[in-house]
Image (cartoon, helix red, strand yellow):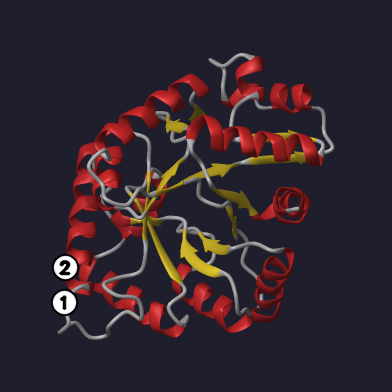
Amino acid sequence: MTRPFRFAVNMLSPGSAAEWREKCRRAESLGYDVILVPDHLGMPAPFPSLVAAAEATERPRLGTFVLNAGLWNPALLAREVATTDQLTGGRLELGLGAGYVKEEHERAGLPFGSPRERVDHLEHTVTELTRLLGDPEHVPQPAQAPRPPLLLGGNGKRMLRLAARYADIAAFTGAITTDSGALRLLSPAVIEERMAVYHEFAADRETPAELNYLSQVVAVDADRRATARKLGEHAPDLTEDELIEHPAVLAGSVKDIAEQVRGHRERYGFTYFTILEPNMEAFARVMEELRA
């Protein structure tokens, strides 16, 4: 059975308490299912922001997208997660990733490590959180048992295996990190290959995970080819046609974009789409079309 769509907005910019509450209420009124907060220095702190979002709204789920596991100690993170789940009334969804911004680790005075070391730490964090939050003796207890839904994001083979084993939601970026720390888009064909690897790892799951994708560009009423050409510098190995069909790029009329989203569900299995805060208003028109 095909899952229904879910749509999230990832809030990027800090502001006053009043501004934050208003943004969250606006996301709710526009129909977003989830309000997300990333985990980057220079952006809002995730857990207090989600508690404030819960106080300002009633319906949306609230999540981290995604926590950089290298910045967190598992025992302290378990306390934050359980407390936030309680204070949000059991609306928390916990997103975790291995981290990819070396400069943030340096600013925090924490080791960045190799890709293997970062994934090792993420796996340790996931297993410890599962153990701690599932322990009836753990204080505080999360509102959701045995823990909030877990989202794991990444594209590498070890990350896909980890997501297949533990994640309730598997998130895909469709990009890799270059040596300079920049993100470079993978081709649609490579995304399909990564999805096939994930499904192979997840073949024995009793309950399939929800599949998430972060669409980084939303250009409503814009020319699709012109939009694709602007992204060429971030994807020098991709053709214009590959960029046009890429799930990271949603461009065209409202009906065109709605068809693109449906097509990405058909091709890749994505039913949960994340949109960046600057695109919140524009994409709301697409959600309305998809739900009509």
At label 2, which amino acid type do we have? Arg
Residue name at image x 49 percent, y 33 percent:
268
Q: Which residue is mark 2?
A: 131
At label 1, which amino acid type do we have? Asp
Q: Residues within 10 Å of mark 2 (few under 14, many from 20)?
A: some
Label 2: state its secondary structure. helix
Residue name at image x 60 percent, y 74 percent:
59
Closest to the observer, 86 or 268: 268
Q: Is residue 173 above or below residue 13?
A: above
Which numbered marker is on residue 135?
Answer: 1
Which quadrant of the view contains residue 53? bottom right
Which quadrant of the view contains residue 132? bottom left
Label 1: state its secondary structure. loop
Q: Residues within 10 Å of mark 1 (few under 14, many from 20)?
A: few
Direction from residue 94 to residue 273 in the image, left or right: right
Direction from residue 98 to residue 101 in the image, left or right: right
- Residue 48 position within the rendered picture, expressed as x and y whole percent measured from the top left: 48, 77
Residue name at image x 53 percent, y 46 percent:
271
**Cα–Cα span, label 2 and label 1:** 6 Å
Contact (CB < 8 A) between labels 2 and 1? Answer: yes
- Residue 252 position within the rendered picture, expressed as x and y whole percent measured from the top left: 79, 33
- Residue 102 position within the rendered picture, expressed as x and y whole percent measured from the top left: 37, 44
Q: Is residue 230 above or below residue 74?
A: above
Residue name at image x 35 percent, y 76 percent:
144
